[in-house]
Image: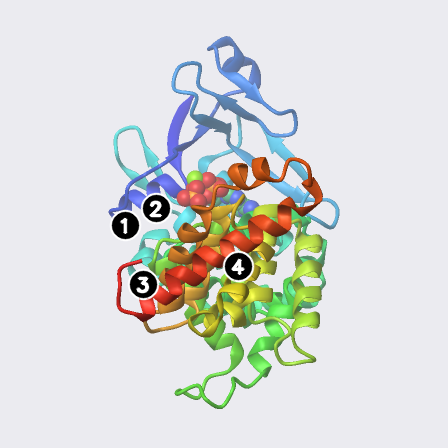
Amino acid sequence: MEIYTVGGAVRDELLGLPVKDRDYVVVGATPEVMLAQGFRPVGKDFPVFLHPRTHEEYALARTERKTAPGYKGFAFHAAADVTLEQDLARRDLTVNAIARATDGSLIDPYGGLRDLQDKLFRHVSPSFAEDPVRILRVARFAARFPAFKVFPATNVLMQEMVAAGEVDALVPERVWQELARGLMEQQPSRMFEVLRACGALARILPELDTLWHATQNASHADCINAGQHTMQIVDRTAQQACDLSIRFAALMRGLGRHGPQLVSGTKQVEAVCARIKVPNDSRDLALMLMREQEQVAQALNLPATGIVALLMRCDAFRKSQRFLDMLRAAACLNDAPFPPAGYLEQALQVARQVDSGVVAAALQDRPQQIAQAVQAARINAVDAWLLNSANGGAA
Ligand code: ATP
Ligand code: MG
């Protein structure tokens, strides 16, 4: 049997990038041979094995045939007579269909090297159209390799897949998984650009897609639409190496702003999150940013009562990291320094210094008054801090 490195590891090595995980293809073997050599089978559907020592993935060379709509409808043929070229033919992009033999030589039957050079994402064969996950993958790769363009014929193929309803068959978990990975890449806006160019965004996230038809408020210096504005914001969260929940909140925060405002925005975020099963931390941060972005922007003009009310609405005393994350997201909405973020962070520190245990102990006989007394003490503390800052003193 022969073993080849394939996929992302070969691609990234050729691009001079660090390689995280390696995938191998085994030609000329059978499951029995693999098991006899100590490889352990992964799952039951795929002819994939884990190396007994390195635990890296070794897949038997295989061909695929589409048998039903959706991405589970595949039949595999893995046998000792399947060639490397046949296995590479079922892969999504030419740049992902290059193999490296153990002697270091490259096997590149589909022009992957040329496309790496030209920075093109090109489908390997028309069977690309059999798996809509590939659209998400191409979009995600565009976010990772922003200089790469989708080959025009590949874009046409993707448009046809969208028109044929293929994208609607994607399972929500997979949509979220790929979107989340793309959001964590260098330039997430490229992912949405690719999804828009083939029409997939309107199927996956119609709430976001409509932003490109909404005019930005007149005060915005450049003449850009709300979608373009959102993309600038999301790319800023990437430049600042923000966590996923912050990037997602930034992505969602413009939703519904052009209809009857906040209520519809909140509803739309909830709908998106329910539909593609967004994890709670990302959803909650998106909803909080949607709800509070205006108040946060106004923070410097808020009285102590308003500041403490904001902190309490955000549950900032118990979940302070989430509150700080929201401030980071809010800061990314602006292309200039954003004083309210540091200001509210300081206000939280001040308000937290109130010892609620001491307040509670003093009210042991009137427990129903504790919450109110704690709030009053926090307001007092913030008030004193505001007064002190206004007088030029250190907080
Ligand atoms: P990453 O760096 O994100 O791991 P990758 O290209 O290595 O990128 P993997 O998901 O690890 O992606 O898959 C390994 C290889 O398997 C790909 O390079 C590609 O050749 C092939 N592959 C994976 N998923 C698909 C798919 N849905 N359709 C066709 N080929 C695929
Ligand atoms: Mg990989």
Q: Is residue 137 visible?
A: no
Q: Which residue is mark 4?
A: 308
Q: Secondary structure at mark 3?
A: helix
| Amino acid under disc 3 | Asp
Q: Nearer the viewer, mark 4 or mark 3?
A: 4
In the rendering, which numbered label is found on residue 11? 2
Measure the alpha-carbon separation of dots 2 and 4: 52 Å
| 322 and 15: which is toward the camera | 322
**Quarter that holds the N terminus:** top left
- The reply to whether callout 3 and callout 2 are in contact (CB within 8 Å) is no
- The reply to whether callout 2 and callout 1 are in contact (CB within 8 Å) is yes
Q: Quadrant of ligand 2?
A: top left
Q: How many marks?
A: 4
| 269 and 165: which is toward the camera | 269
Of label 4 and label 3, which has the lower sequence position?
A: 3
Q: Which residue is mark 1?
A: 15
Of label 4 and label 1, which has the lower sequence position?
A: 1
Toward the bottom, the furthest residue is 218
Q: Which residue is mark 3?
A: 118
Q: Nearer the viewer, mark 4 or mark 1?
A: 4
- The reply to whether callout 4 and callout 3 are in contact (CB within 8 Å) is no
Q: Secondary structure at mark 1?
A: loop
Measure the alpha-carbon separation of dots 3 and 2: 13 Å
Q: State the image coordinates of residue 387 (x, y, percent, origin top left).
A: 37, 66
| Amino acid under disc 2 | Arg
Q: Is residue 291 visible?
A: yes
Colour pattern of the rendering: rainbow
Q: State the image coordinates of residue 358 (x, y, percent, origin top left).
A: 52, 38
Q: Quadrant of residue 42?
A: top right
**Quarter that holds the C terminus:** bottom left
User: Local crowd at mark 1 within 10 Å, few (<14), some, or many (≥20)?
Assistant: few
